[in-house]
Image (spheres, rainbow, N blue to C red):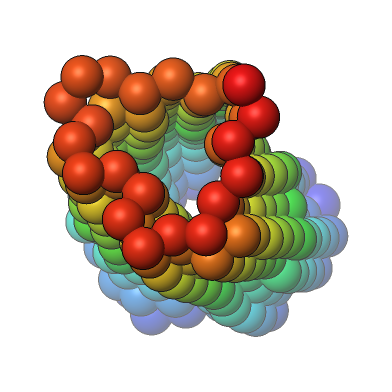
């Protein structure tokens, strides 16, 4: 069913919807606009109310905007796909199993992607990523620019390609994470990590990679400011 050029607000206006396509629809002030819905396609839509997509399955959003007022918009979902979207909402993603993102801009990445698993992310720009990707698992990420603090803490089985990190304390307590061809800038990188592998990465910032267990540095370079690196770590260097 097609719903186009309409405005919805209030409590749960499209609750338990099934098999609908939204075009140029605004879900305004209120809560839980699409909660418990299935097989939803949204194109050129504006999401302004809180908790708009919760406990949903098989949702695809294209060229949509999640406004700052849309707090915690995408939680506890399965099989979520976003393309060409702008997300100004805080705490955008959490507890999602099956996540596909392409060409996404997130202006407030604080506490987002917690416990997200089994997905692919490409061409992402994220600002203010405070504690982003905590406990994330099974993600393949490429062509991203991430700014913030404490990114990928306790993350597991993450693969990253062609990234730029401007962060502090990234990959603390992480396990089985691999980063390829990336610029990693920040303090205290990878402390207490297990099986962290960095391939052709450029590393800068004070005291990186201390207390690591089974760290692999494969053709990596360190900037002059990367002082006191590798203290009390077990590591292998591939020159």
Q: Is residue 49 above or below residue 103?
A: below
Q: Where is residue 77 drawn, in percent x and y?
A: 64, 71
Residue 89 appears anywhere in the view: no
Q: Position of residue 12 (x, y in %)?
A: 47, 78
Residue 154 visible, this orientation: yes
**What count of labels does the image hold?**
0
The residue shown at (19%, 36%) is 227
Q: Which quadrant of the view contains residue 55?
A: bottom right
5 horizontally vs 180: left or right: left
Q: Is residue 207 left or right of residue 17?
A: left
Residues 162 and 213: in front is 213
Q: 133 or 35, which lies in front?
A: 133
Q: Is 185 placed left or right of 8 in the picture? A: left
Instruction: Residue 116 in the image: state x and y as whole percent.
Output: 59, 66
Residue at x-position 23% and y-position 32%? 226
Q: Name the residue: 44% across, 20% down.
A: 221
Q: Which of 96 and 32 is in front in this view?
A: 96
- Which quadrant would residue 148 be assigned to in this image? top left
When the figure is inspected, residue 109 is found, relative to residue 226, above or below; the finding is below
Q: Residue 14: which quarter of the image?
A: bottom right
Q: Picture coordinates of residue 183 (x, y %)?
A: 41, 22
- Viewport quadrant of the C terminus: top right
Identify the residue shown where x is 36% and y is 63%: 232
């Amino acid at each position: 069913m097609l719903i186009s050029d309409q405005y919805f607000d209030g409590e749960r206006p499209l609750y338990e919807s099934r098999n609908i396509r939204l075009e140029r629809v605004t879900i305004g002030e209120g809560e839980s606009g699409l909660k418990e819905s299935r097989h939803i396609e949204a194109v050129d839509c504006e999401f302004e109310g809180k908790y708009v997509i919760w406990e949903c399955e098989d949702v695809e959003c294209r060229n949509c905007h999640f406004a700052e007022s849309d707090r915690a918009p995408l939680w506890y979902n399965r099989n979520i796909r976003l393309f060409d979207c702008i997300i100004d909402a805080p705490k955008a993603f959490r507890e999602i199993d099956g996540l596909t993102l392409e060409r996404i801009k997130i202006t407030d990445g604080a506490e987002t992607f917690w416990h997200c698993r089994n997905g692919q992310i490409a061409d992402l720009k994220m600002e203010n990523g405070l504690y982003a990707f905590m406990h994330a698992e099974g993600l393949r990420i490429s062509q991203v620019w991430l700014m913030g603090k404490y990114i990928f803490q306790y993350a597991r089985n993450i693969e990253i390609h062609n990234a730029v990190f401007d962060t502090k304390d990234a990959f603390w307590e992480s396990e089985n994470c691999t980063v390829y061809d990336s610029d990693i800038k920040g303090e205290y990188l990878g402390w207490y990590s297990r099986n962290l592998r960095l391939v052709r990465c450029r590393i800068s910032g004070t005291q990186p990679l201390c207390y690591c267990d089974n760290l692999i540095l494969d053709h990596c370079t360190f900037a002059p400011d990367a002082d006191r690196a590798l203290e009390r770590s077990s590591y292998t260097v591939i020159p």
